[in-house]
Amino acid sequence: MLIPFAKKSALVGLLVASAVAQPVIAADDYKLGLVTFLSGGAAGPFGVPAQNAANLVLETLNEGALPAPYNVKGINGRTIKPIYVDEAGGATKQSSEYRNLVERQGVDAVVGYISSGDCLAVPAVAEELKTLTVLFDCGTPRVFEDNSFKYVFRTGPTTTMDSVAASYYIKDIFPNLKAVSGINQNYSFGHESWADFYGSLKGLQSDIVVPTKQFPKIYAGQYGAEISALMVNSADVIHSSFWGGDMEAFLLQGAARGLFEDQTALLTTGESAMYRLSDQIPEGTILGGRGPFGIYAPDNALNRWFRDAYSKRYGTQPTYPAYKMVQGILGLKLATEQAAAKVSGQPTTEDVVSAFEYLEYEGPGGKVSMNMGKGHQASMEMVYGRYALKDGKPAVTDVRRYAAECVNPSDDMPANEWIEKGMPGAKCN
Amino acid sequence: MKLVIAMLMDGVIYASWLFVIAAGLTLIYGVMRILNMAHGSFYAIGAYGGASLVGFYLAGGYPPWGAYFMLLGAALIGGTIVGLLIERGLLRMMYGRDEVVMILVTYAILLILEDVIKLIWGVDAYFAYQPYTLLGRTKLAGLSFANYDILLIFVSALICFVLWWGLNRTRKGKLLQAVIHDRDTAAFLGINVTRMFTVTFVIGAVLGALAGALTAPGISVMPGIGVEVIILAFAVVVIGGLGSVGGALLGALIVGLARSAAVHLYPDAELFVIYGVMGLVLAFRPQGLFAIATARKI
């Protein structure tokens, strides 16, 4: 008798446990699909900080405790229920996962995507399923240059401004600049970053010399030969759009060999490592944060709340993927609530789309203007600075800000063409 | 001159790193005829274990030079435990199966271990850079090289010598060669083939973990590092000939020097050159440079 009783108890226990484990979703809840890297090499530096930020901001939004104008509970009063999906696995898998989120899970909207490959693949499915989708982090300008989407928005800026602002910055900091080398990953992001950077720099200084440009495989981890090549072919500045573990390994190996003693590293995503490797980054290294994020974020109420709450909960300062995730969620919330203000009851997806186009709003990183890609692509100012230790703590000096109109093309011109033509119409201070 | 020294040094350092990874892989194949995809996981476990142990050790305020022993300890402990668990717990039930089946089995183990690593260490990166910077650097022809990387050349040479000596100059090694030559006859002559398999697999796992532990100080230890190196290690052992330690050494040197030359002379070919060399070798010697061609059952 004991065995059947034990079996029954176990079965009941399992049923209770599984019932408890299921998220309770009420009919009027706002189901939000959130797609970010939860495994693989991009999870640690990007995916998990973004997920942490999403958890924090959704919880606070559901309590209605965020600073105004985000102090309405949830999204237009509806409690937000997140459904997370791991972005690892490639574009084909993500297209299927997206379909699953919409057709099976019935999400109201999706915020996600760090990989440019996923950002180029998913919008077609979003358009087919007529589902509001916010791309929060990926950088390729091709998303809205090659296509016109109705339901897809990107609240994070493109890689173009990283590279263009980087060229302005080194021209400002090094008036006698002669040579620039590059080390970028051998995939679309690395090649696009270098092409935009070199193209814009060439436009600013036609006699610039490139002693060497290296494109090692992504996740290579070992950069001994590349570091030697950079030493043999010395330059004033070494440009790199390396991110995550690749950037960190390059920094560690380069610093150990003294690479950065004679040459200055320009790391367009370097801000994400400044706390993790604070005692290994050489002072004077130029750090970018893919926008006015992290240490470059303005001193506004939202940013003060975000930095304080994030560091209290996770024990570290938020880096740019965290900022961009919050920016994406807040854009969606604001567009939905502005659309709701014009209709009775909950707004339709089409209403939200209309409200989202050309929206301007404040995020923790400052002003976000959805003024590119026919109102679907954000532009922001871009900031660079140089790493320094102040009282033993990581900080930045020589900070320069470049207005969005200075580092982004006009809406009617693709980024590469704009750079090739010498960045016409750029409004710089 | 500067360029030649840079190419040679970079090539040899990279080859040393490749050889430490490939040595365990080729040893296991040579003895057990298992093309062990899970070798990448041994590497990752060594790297994570090394980074964690070094972190704990240095946080305790102990002398920094002791961190090198932590790396070795992590490889020994991690490789032995995981190697024993896999060989005793799973592979022993699969011996005698087709090589393709064993590839699938070890690939499954790789995937499982990737998730186990994620469960234990999470997805955040780990750093253990102190051993990398502690040894300083040496200038050669105006170029600085990390002494840790130079030390890796000697460690790799030592591993190569110990493997050669163990296989050719010891009684156990000669027994192992008998198993390699013909496992049925070896068993008939009273050699405990099962135990030989266990010992070989554990040594191979420790070598894989050692490669990871020695690499950890120079990199950001993060998810997926094991999967990245296994492809390179396969290229090396295929060039040298599966199952040959000497072949792995030669394969590592060829790949290391070819890659280094590409990076310095024609960077666009950096990725192509490794697999280009592999294709070229296989076109002329499909069995690899050191392996002896054998008839295959169809």
Image: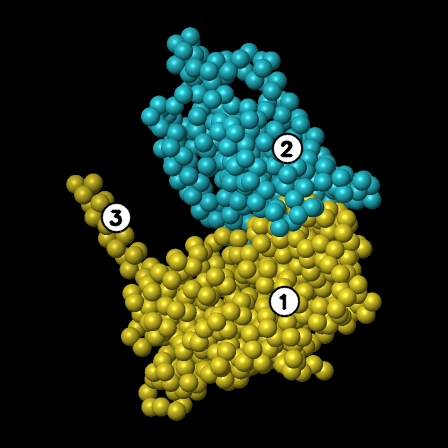
Q: Quadrant of residue A171?
A: bottom right
Residue, x 51% and y 69% (percent of image)? A142
Instruction: Name the one closer to the observer, A46 or B107.
Output: B107
How crowded pointer 1 is (Cα within 10 Å; few <14, some 14-19, many 20+) is rated as many
Q: Amino acid at mark 3?
A: Ala
Q: Amino acid at mark 2?
A: Leu
* Cα gap from disc 1 to disc 3, whole angstroms: 61 Å
Q: Which residue is mark 1?
A: A196
Q: Secondary structure at mark 1?
A: helix
x and y percentages locating residue A147 in the rendered image: 45, 73
Task: Identify the residue at the far top of this view.
Answer: B189
Residue, x 66% and y 37% (percent of image)? B257
Query: Do marks 3 and 2 share a subunit?
Result: no
Q: Colour of chain A?
A: yellow
Note the chain letter of the cyan one: B
Q: Amino acid at mark 1?
A: Asp
x and y percentages locating residue A231 in the rendered image: 76, 50
Q: Secondary structure at mark 2?
A: helix
Residue, x 43% and y 59% (percent of image)? A91
Q: Chain of mark 3?
A: A
Q: Which residue is mark 2?
A: B253
* Cα gap from disc 3 to disc 2, whole angstroms: 58 Å
x and y percentages locating residue A73 in the rendered image: 42, 80
Q: Is residue A304 visible?
A: no
Q: Which residue is mark 3?
A: A10
Q: Is residue B112 left or right of residue B3?
A: left
Mark 3 or 2, closer to the camera? 2
Q: Quadrant of residue B213?
A: top right
